[in-house]
Amino acid sequence: MKEYFNQKVKWYKKTGNNAYGQPVYAPAVEVMCRFQGGMKLIKDKQGKESVSQGVFYLEEKVELDDKLEYEGKQYNVMNYSDTVDLDGVFILFYEYHGLCPWF
């Protein structure tokens, strides 16, 4: 699958919260990915049903509070899953995302 990672996404990792409780993010890191657009009904981090705008396939483990920027659009991570091989070694990470107004 990694040979299909021919797109780039900017990853903003959440590092904590400021004094007002607002999230603080590390500077963007550009990583290789595979983006597949399309609507899908998923459960978000609160367990509510939500519609995802697509999925990113990545080698990095992105967390629920992290943000992504792809082709000038900003996305929040709504749900994720990872894949391991038969030896239990992590090989692939994918997450569902939705558009977010955070910039």
Image (cartoon, rainbow, N blue to C red):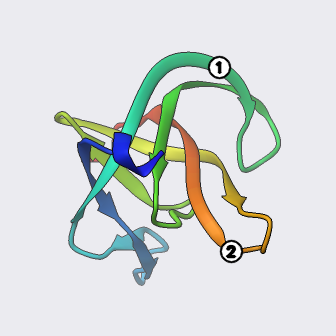
- State the residue position of label 2: 89
Residue 81, percent from left and from top: 69, 52
Residue 87 found in image quarter: bottom right
Q: Can residue 64 be seen in the rendering of this structure?
A: no
Front residue (pair 47, 5): 5
Residue 75 % position (x, y): 39, 40
* Three-letter code for the amino acid on which mark 1 is drawn: Lys
Q: Is residue 49 above or below residue 40?
A: below
Dot placed on the residue nearer the N-terminal end, 2 or 1: 1
Amino acid type at circle 2 is Val
Q: CB of mark 2 within 8 Å of CB of mark 1? A: no
* Residue drawn where x is 43% and y is 68% of the image: 22
Q: Which residue shows up at 51% across the image and 34% down it?
A: 55
Image position, residue 6 (x, y; %): 25, 41
| SS under mark 1 | strand
Q: Position of residue 2 (x, y in %)?
A: 41, 51
Residue 13 visible? The answer is: yes
At 44% from the left and 26% from the top, the residue drawn is 36
Q: Which residue is mark 1?
A: 40
Disc 2 versus disc 1: nearer the observer: 2
Q: Quadrant of residue 101?
A: top left
Where is 99 relative to 3, above or below? above
- Would you call the spot at circle 1 few (<14 residues within 10 Å), some (14-19), or many (20 or more)? some
| Front-lying residue, 40 or 33 | 33
For the residues labelled 2 and 1, the Cα–Cα distance comes to: 28 Å
Assess disc 2: are there few (<14), some (14-19) or many (≥20) residues with their C-alpha within 10 Å of its C-alpha: few
Going by the image, does 33 lie left or right of 55?
Answer: left
Q: Residue furthest left?
A: 72
